[in-house]
Image (cartoon, rainbow, N blue to C red):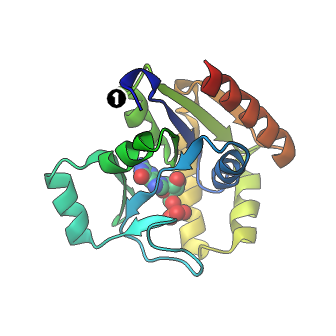
Amino acid sequence: MTDSNKKIIIITAPSGAGKTSVTKYLLQKNPQLAFSVSAATRQPRAFEQNGKDYYFISLREFHQKIKENAFVEWEMVYEGKYYGTLKGELERIWEEDKIPVLDIDVHGAIHVQEQFPAISLSVFIEPPSVEELKIRLEKRGTENAEGIETRLKKAAYELSFKQQFNHIIVNDDLQKTFSEANKIVADFILA
Ligand code: 5GP
């Protein structure tokens, strides 16, 4: 892909607001898009695949990559758990003439946006309320009570950054959110 065609799509939101569902929907609807697989130091969940959902690496390997300047951005998203977008991953996707879609936390999204202001599109998925977010996280069942509490605290803080993104979609109806996001992305792909 020539430099003038390179683009990046960032989907961000507090955990549990629906950004992974939105990301999956966009990828399924738009063959020009490809999921940017992040590196992460947490344990894989059941059904998660190395190289598909994340590159699951050790803390040591993660630190090595920081030293090598291999990340576009990285964050300790939760206590002791590191996540990062690899430069090589974006390059790999651009090489395939596709647009990377990043499903990343709010701080990571701000960093990517700062580095690629001219070529990035950022969409913030807002939960209807923190109470609703709690219900969703409980239903999802991937966190224990302490994990849910941590994510809720972080969510309240992350909501304060929403104005920094190109678009905000309040996810009170998933189908409506899907079509709104798809319209925004379709316009960006064509622009
Ligand atoms: P989970 O552990 O639930 O898969 O992800 C936790 C959070 O980390 C989510 O908000 C997810 O979007 C975010 N995340 C995933 N990959 C990255 C990344 O490469 N960088 C940053 N900053 N956050 C990420």
Residue at image x 48%, y 28%? 120
Please count the marks in the image. 1
If the image is split into quadrants, where does the N terminus sit? top left
| Residue 113 visible, this orientation | yes
Residue 27 x %, y %: 65, 48
In the image, is the residue at mark 1 within 8 Å of ligand 1 by its beta carbon? no
In the shown orientation, is residue 148 left or right of residue 61?
right
Q: Nearer the viewer, residue 13 or 135?
A: 13
Residue 142 x %, y %: 62, 73
Q: Is residue 170 above or below residue 19?
A: above
Residue 150 x %, y %: 52, 62
In the shown orientation, is residue 101 left or right of residue 88?
right
Name the residue tied to disc 1: 115
Residue at image x 68%, y 23%? 187
If the image is split into quadrants, where does the C terminus sit? top right
In the shown orientation, is residue 99 left or right of residue 41?
right
Q: Nearer the viewer, residue 103 or 165?
A: 103
Residue 178 sits in quarter = top right
Residue found at the very far left of the displayed protein: 67
Q: Is residue 133 above or below residue 170?
A: below
Secondary element at image label 1: helix
Q: Is residue 94 above or below residue 7?
A: below
- Crowd rating for badge 1 (residues with CA inside 10 Å; few <14, some 14–19, many 20+): few
| Residue 173 visible, this orientation | no
Residue 62 sits in quarter = bottom left
Residue at image x 74%, y 61%? 136
Residue at image x 44%, y 29%? 6
Residue 183 x %, y %: 75, 29
Q: Amino acid at mark 1?
A: Gln
